[in-house]
Image: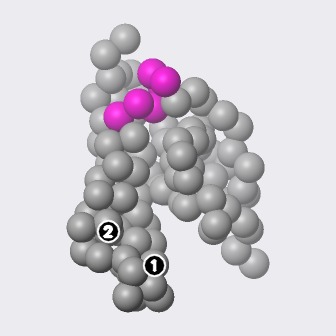
Amino acid sequence: MQYKYEVKYEASYHIWSFYRNVARKYRHTFVTEDIVANARRAIRAMNQIEKTLLRRKPTIRRWQNYHMAHSGHWYYAYTIDGDTITIHDACHERDMHEDD
């Protein structure tokens, strides 16, 4: 099946803000090109959901109503409606824990 992908603002925001924070923390070794390359890689990986990134059961409570996929250091929460996959959230593996 050929899917269309829709990425919600929150998902892309979490990816870009994660890499901005890393660059701030490691400002002497992490350059702008690294931020852009890493963020684009994480966003491109979303296009592999339900193709090479297989559906998983969510491991955190806030994603219980979604499917979950994993690629590299990133986890994605998404829904499927017909031929459209909507990515609602993205979370780096370091942050995959419950927010209490």
In which quadrant is the N terminus drawn?
A: top left
Report the side of 99 relative to 54 (left or right).
right
- Quickly name the residue at label 1: 22
Q: Mark 2: which secondary structure?
A: helix
> Secondary structure of the magenta portion, mostly?
loop
Q: Residue 98: within the magenta?
A: no
Classify mark 1: residues with Cα within 10 Å, few (<14), some (14-19) or many (20+).
few
- Quickly name the residue at label 2: 35
On screen, residue 18 above or below 70: below
Residue 12 locus on image (x, y percent)? 35, 60
In which quadrant is the C terminus drawn?
A: bottom right
Residue 93 locus on image (x, y percent)? 62, 59
Q: How many numbered marks have been drawn onto this rendered protein structure?
A: 2
Identify which residue, 97 or 31, lies in the foreground: 31
Residue 91 locus on image (x, y percent)? 54, 60
Report the side of 100 relative to 55 (left or right).
right
Give the magenta-colored segment's residue range: 47-52
Q: Residue type at mark 1?
A: Val
Residue at figure coordinates x 67%, y 62% from the top left: 96
Identify which residue, 50 or 84, lies in the foreground: 50
Q: Residue type at mark 2?
A: Ile
Residue at figure coordinates x 57%, y 42% from the top left: 70
- Mark yes or no: residue 21 visible: no
On screen, residue 49 above or below 10: above
Report the side of 84 relative to 62 (left or right).
left
- Mark yes or no: residue 57 visible: yes
Q: Are the residues tagged 1 and 2 within 8 Å (C-beta)?
A: yes
Report the side of 36 relative to 57 (left or right).
left
Task: In the displayed orientation, state which residue is furthest to the top.
Answer: 1
